[in-house]
Image (cartoon, rainbow, N blue to C red):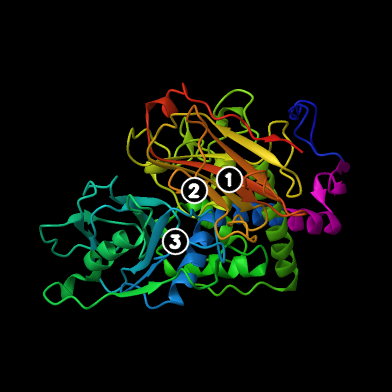
Amino acid sequence: MTTHATRTPVPPGIECPDELRTRLGTLRFSDGFPDDATVRTLFDNLDFQRAVEAYLLGLAPVDMAVMRTALARWGPANSTMAIWEDLVHPRFIGLVYNTSTSYCYAWLDLRDGPLVVEVPPGVYGGVDDHWCRWVVDVGLTGPDRGEGGSYLFLPPGYDGDVPDGHVVVRPPTYGNFLGYRGFRDEHGDPHPAVEVIKANTRIYALSQADDPPPMRFVNASPEPAVAVPPADHRFWELLDQVVQSEPPASADPLTLGIFASLGIRNGRAFAPDDRMRAVLTEAAAVGDATARALTYRFRRPEAYYWPGSAWRTGFLGGYRFEEDGAALLDSAAQLYFWGGSTSPAWEQKMVGAGSQYAFAFVDATGSPFDGGGAYRLHVPPEVPAATFWSVIVYDTQTRSMLQTGQEWPSVTSQDQALVTNEDGSVDVRFGPGPPDGAGNWIQTLPGKGWFTMFRLYGPLEPWFDKTWRLPDITRVS
């Protein structure tokens, strides 16, 4: 029997009331012990919370899984490169592509041993691992500095001989995504760069170095294809594919623990029962909705380039999405929702090299863009871009280029028909019909939302020190 002398006073906040009213409803306890209905409610809620967080954390590896699947349609890994020889047309459903460079993609599979990747001169790109983390840049911002070079990719745990003459790369995963871009020439023609790429790109096993097999190049420009992650139960199946195919040491235990709590665990079959399948399906829908809120209404003011501006970066926290040692979960989720990979060359200060990106998801008043309205972007003179700049319009549903009656939903400094004002500025018009003169016009569709990205290739100092400012997009009718 407890006496006053042996009982310790319990401070407030430790003991649980018999009834607790929450957003989940009323939870009931008997001296702190939950009843059966409360246990079911809390477990359903825990599974759902973890599933929504798993969806946001899983956007990155599922981006890679979708790209791996898309590339497989054109041929096997390590011997096939897809090239958008005639640039990327809006018929390709892929995350925020541009209309100015020839994308070149290949999937690297290190399960059978080291791979040699011979990179051509003049390209810009890099490699991300299967978890969509940056591994290495190649080309202009990589160790070869745009002169071309040989990269040797070693599989996880490799302890064999490493020959000289290569840039040695040790990714933590077996599967890795290689992507780089070729540029148009002074006439706006992408094909000379494509020919250089095809003549100088080789991927082969180190064991075949004395007699490398031929590469297969596939022109992906004419083909419709989809490389955007789904927001239904297929999402979890794709995530499971990544978890099963990579060593657990390649990811952090907390993330893998969240996935494992949902039944996605390395070496074990993913077989959710009806209850968990329903939880996962709903969580994917809510996760997708959350990623859209984070993307289109990002809450961190420091992500915006100028005070009060609608233009913002997609890389708050850098390419690692970290700040003061803490992961910026919201920043990572929105990046992997609208984009499919990452690199320090996309966000770090590299004057005259790399690239920079600014997004506008709303107009100057903070309103979403209306596909039935007319808008204007005034691009001031002396755009700080050594190579080129561009404005491209994307579909708010797919985050892919808007499909309209126009061949290209863009205006770029490389366009031969670009209309420039007397002071060197450029006015870009958006709307369902062409304005007077029809110059610098990007078509939109009534009833269809859109957003835009402003790209600078070879960004210059005025972009970084913010002495050059891009005005917000204004509605004119």
Q: Which residue carries the number 1 mark?
A: 439
Disc 3 to disc 1: CB gap under 8 Å:
no
- What x and y, as percent, mark residue 130? 42, 61
Q: Which residue carries the number 3 mark?
A: 87
**Quick one: 264 or 282, which is closer to the camera?**
282
Q: Which residue carries the number 2 mark?
A: 417
User: Which element carries disc 3, helix, strand or loop?
Assistant: loop
Say which mark, if any, is on residue 406.
Answer: none
Q: Specify which label sits upstream in the sequence, 3 or 1.
A: 3
Disc 2 to disc 1: CB gap under 8 Å:
yes
Q: Residues within 10 Å of mark 1 (few under 14, many from 20)?
A: some
User: Which element carries disc 1, helix, strand or loop?
Assistant: loop
Quarter of the image where the C terminus is located: top right
Task: Find out whether residue 344 is within the magenta segment.
Answer: no
Tell me the amino acid under the disc marked 2.
Ala
**Quick one: 142 or 104, which is closer to the camera?**
104
Q: Residues within 10 Å of mark 2 (few under 14, many from 20)?
A: few
Q: Specify which label sits upstream in the sequence, 2 or 3.
A: 3
Q: Specify which label sits upstream in the sequence, 2 or 1.
A: 2
For the point 17% across and 74% down, the residue is 207
- What x and y, as percent, mark residue 285? 72, 59
- The magenta segment is 19-45
User: Which element carries disc 2, helix, strand or loop?
Assistant: loop
